[in-house]
Amino acid sequence: MKNSGKGFIIGLATGITAGTIFALLYAPDTGKNTRGRLSYRLNSYVDELRSLIEQLKDEKEKISSQAKEDSDKVIEDAKNRADGLIKEAESLLENIEKSDK
């Protein structure tokens, strides 16, 4: 997940750069209008990127929380099984000791 987010950001930055260069080279409008549009688009890309970063952070927290819950369940289950095995072993030892007498 770490690499896919990094690759997405690199791809997004590359696309923004290529789009900006293309727009500048083929813009039939005045420089002032072009700069205004570029500024607007850049701001919208920044806002979208911030939103995506927040979504990724939220998803990371959800996954971390779920993983912790799952690991706690596994640990609790292992403890319960170990307790059961210990009780069973103690019972077997008692039976062995009784049968030896």
Image (spheres, rainbow, N blue to C red):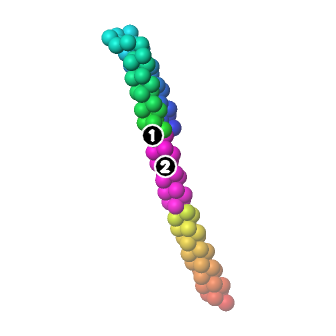
Q: Quadrant of residue 90?
A: bottom right
Q: Earlier in the sequence, mark 2 or mark 1?
A: 1
Residue indicated by mark 1: 52
> Which residue is located at x 54 percent, y 58 percent?
68
Q: Check disc 2 and report its element: helix, strand or loop.
A: helix
Q: Position of residue 40 (x, y in %)?
A: 42, 28
Q: Quadrant of the C terminus?
A: bottom right
Q: Could you say which disc has been placed on residue 58 in the image?
A: 2
| Magenta segment | 53-71
Residue 67 makes an appearance in the image: no
Binning the other alpha carbons within 10 Å of mark 2 as few (below 14), some (14 to 19) or many (20 upward) gives few
The kind of residue tagged 1 is: Leu
Is 55 covered by the magenta stretch?
yes
Q: Check disc 1 and report its element: helix, strand or loop.
A: helix
Q: Foreground residue, 78 or 92?
A: 78
Q: Position of residue 95 (x, y in %)?
A: 60, 85
